[in-house]
Image (cartoon, rainbow, N blue to C red):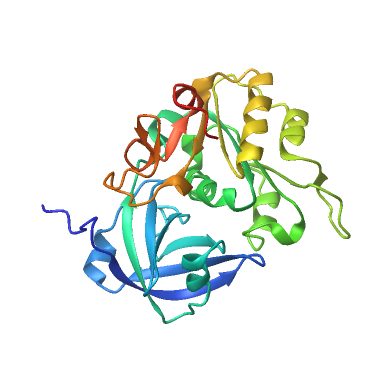
Amino acid sequence: MTDPFNPYLPEVATILETVQETHNIMTFRVRFDDAAKMAAFTFGPGQVGQLSAPGIGESTFVINSPPTRMDYLQFSVMRTGEVTGKLHNLVAGDKIGVRAPLGKPFPVEDMKGKDIVFVGGGIGMAPLRTLFLYMLDNRADFGKIRLLYGARSPLDMAFSAELPEWTSRDDIETTLTIDRDAEGWQHKVGLIPNVLLEMAPTPENCVAITCGPPIMIKFTLEALKKLGFADEQILTTLEKRMKCGIGICGRCNIGTSYVCVDGPVYTYAQLKQLPNEL
């Protein structure tokens, strides 16, 4: 069967709903206008899409809805420039272009039977969310699941509508933290790497997955190493480096690695073989 998706051509999709996550992060839930293509669409947790802002350009965003829930595809966009600013002006009913799926997914099969530690910061929760929800929908396939999610303040935490469910479930352990105390905050206060060290997850039969601002990732990696995690046990995703998404433009390279072809998911062991650009 011929692949119905041409990676060079955006599929026209309709925005079903928008959610204002924070002052600068908006979530879009979209469906392809072609019902057959929507029904045929498949992807793995961690793969990304290029969203087209009409008349402006396109940018890369992880598909942060899981492949176990296909009523729509969800993308969360932080306003950072011209393209994202245009996207933030779109509303339900507007059309948008989507090129997806692009990149390689998380190695889900290799994680089965293992304990999982998610460490997310701010918008970095988006690429973790797709894998996190996929694992919740296939809960019996995985061991202990722990989520550490942090932001500068409660107002900077994306997916806030979902946090009460995550913190109340008894089959996972969710820890929320903010950098400085805030009125009414009932969870942890502290920088993510420091809270991670307090949690002290053990590395035996465990995989750690982290995503967030580069400085957070840097110190989270150091914390995980202090806890005894091997380089091969640590994963992160670098989708924000992707440009064309298909290995043509050459603008996402780190040394000899093209993020859109070889990533965006990398183990820390793989990253250590490349120039240090975290």
Query: Residue 259's x, y, as percent?
Result: 38, 39
Q: Residue at point 46% right, 66% down?
A: 83
The image quadrant that residue 63 belongs to is bottom left
The answer, for residue 3, to whether it is visible in the render is: yes
Classify 146 as above or below 180: above
Q: Is residue 133 left or right of residue 202?
A: left
Classify 81 as above or below 96: above
Classify 256 as above or below 37: above
Count of labels in the image: 0
| Pick the front one: 30 or 116 | 30
Q: Residue at point 67% right, 31% down?
A: 219
The image quadrant that residue 212 belongs to is top right
Query: Residue 251's x, y, as percent?
Result: 37, 45
Q: Is residue 31 left or right of residue 139?
A: left
| Pick the front one: 110 or 228 | 228
Quadrant of the frame with the C terminus: top right
Q: Is residue 149 left or right of residue 126?
A: right
